[in-house]
Image (tube, grey):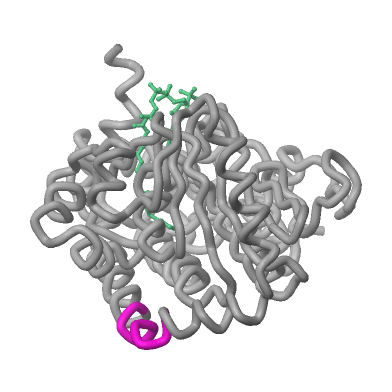
Amino acid sequence: MGASQKDFENAMNQVKLLKEDPGNDAKLKLYALYKQATEGPCNVPEPGVLNSISKAKWDAWNALGSLPKEAARQDYVEFVSSLSPSPKSCSLEGPGANRSLPESEDIVVTTEENITTIMFNRPTKKNALTNEMYQDIMLAMKAASKDNSTITVFTGSGDYYSSGNDLTNFMKISGDLKQVAKESSITLRKFVDSFIDFPKPLVAVVNGPAMGIAATVLGLFDAVYASNRATFHTPFSGLGLTPEGCSSYTFPKIMGRAKATEMLIFGKKITATEACAQGLVTEVFPDDSFQKEVWARLKAYAKNPPNAMRIGKQLIRSTEKENLHAVNAEECRVLQERWVSEECMNGIQNFLSRKAKL
Ligand SMILES: CCCC/C=C/CC(=O)SCCNC(=O)CCNC(=O)[C@H](O)C(C)(C)COP(=O)(O)OP(=O)(O)OC[C@H]1O[C@@H](n2cnc3c(N)ncnc32)[C@H](O)[C@@H]1OP(=O)(O)O
């Protein structure tokens, strides 16, 4: 008997939960089988060779010829099952006795001395944020907003804070590009909303470079402590993209329009010291004493009465909330269009082919 629609949907969900990148060949195969199973034989014009990602996807789909939808669905289910290890149970054990949900290797959540820390933990990829990490961060923030901690901290493991959105994310979601852009826009909106609405003091311990969305949402934090190794870089225009994370509103407000334009539109990278002078960073510390000094300070702050801190934050934030939600919605609407643009495809393609040019 062939795979049912339910088996097919389960397999699609399993793909989103893959812990390891299955590689480009597997992603193309998944894409092609998905399209064949849902739309039948390839029915769109062949993209130009300059558009190499779309062309590779088209080739993979077209190569399936007249394979019937049911057979493609079956092949998709079988292929996903060959990629997925049996699901791991959610455990609270492992490194860090205080580890709390969500369980994910790329996001580590710990609670200690009234501080819940959410750490980006994908150092070999400079802590670039995968689709799964966005979901896990939202879950972690939801849990942190309700736990007994008084302060929530974001930080990164390894030499980067985070290099922002993983530029291969789009290739990991099945479906046509417009649909992928729509889903990403919904994810982004919810993700940024979690920062806008976060009820407790939110602090970033920026241990190294912060790029893209990891840098922009800093404008929504209550304090940002940076190592002097940290840099702040939003190379959106080069990628055919536009500002997100409410930065089109927060950055001009924090640093003035001219400095915000240099960062957000011209892609100027700034140092921690410059970011501090411009108001994005609260304080900069020498890298060799950064962790010791910052954590000592945060542990002292975390002893403050929680309600006073929460209500104080509310007062600072409440007049802006409505604006921020409107800005977020508009930035996501614009990005949904940018993601399907040729400028964006070329920008991402340039990043992906950069290694080959070295
Ligand atoms: C759904 C929500 C969408 C929200 C949208 C947000 C917009 C953004 O955030 S745009 C993203 C902005 N970020 C970038 O443009 C960074 C791209 N990466 C780089 O420029 C460089 O990798 C680096 C400057 C961060 C580091 O360069 P370095 O030469 O020191 O190391 P690499 O060998 O390049 O990196 C190691 C390893 O990590 C991979 N990697 C790093 N960053 C990303 C990334 N953002 N996306 C995907 N992959 C990334 C890099 O490819 C390397 O992988 P391999 O070892 O497999 O080659």
Residue 318 highlighted magenta (yes or no): yes
Q: Where is residue 20 in the image (x, y as percent from the top left)?
A: 65, 37
Range covered by the magenta-colored residues: 317-324
Q: Is residue 60 visible?
A: no
Residue drawn at point x = 46 percent, y = 64 percent: 222
Residue 107 highlighted magenta (yes or no): no
Q: Quadrant of ligand 1?
A: top left
User: In terms of depth relative to the viewer, which is nearer, 358 or 300?
Assistant: 300
Query: In the rendered image, which quarter is residue 336 located in?
Result: bottom left
Residue drawn at point x = 45 percent, y = 85 percent: 315
Residue drawn at point x = 75 percent, y = 62 percent: 7
Left or right relative to 119: residue 47 = left
Query: Is 227 drawn above or below residue 236 in the view shown?
Result: above
Q: Where is residue 248 in the image (x, y as percent from the top left)?
A: 23, 65
Q: Quadrant of the C terminus?
A: top left
Left or right relative to 96: residue 321 = left
Query: In the rendered image, which quarter is residue 256 located in?
Result: bottom left
Name the chief secondary structure element in magenta.
Answer: helix
Q: Position of residue 202 (x, y in %)?
A: 53, 63
Query: Is 186 drawn above or below residue 240 in the view shown?
Result: below
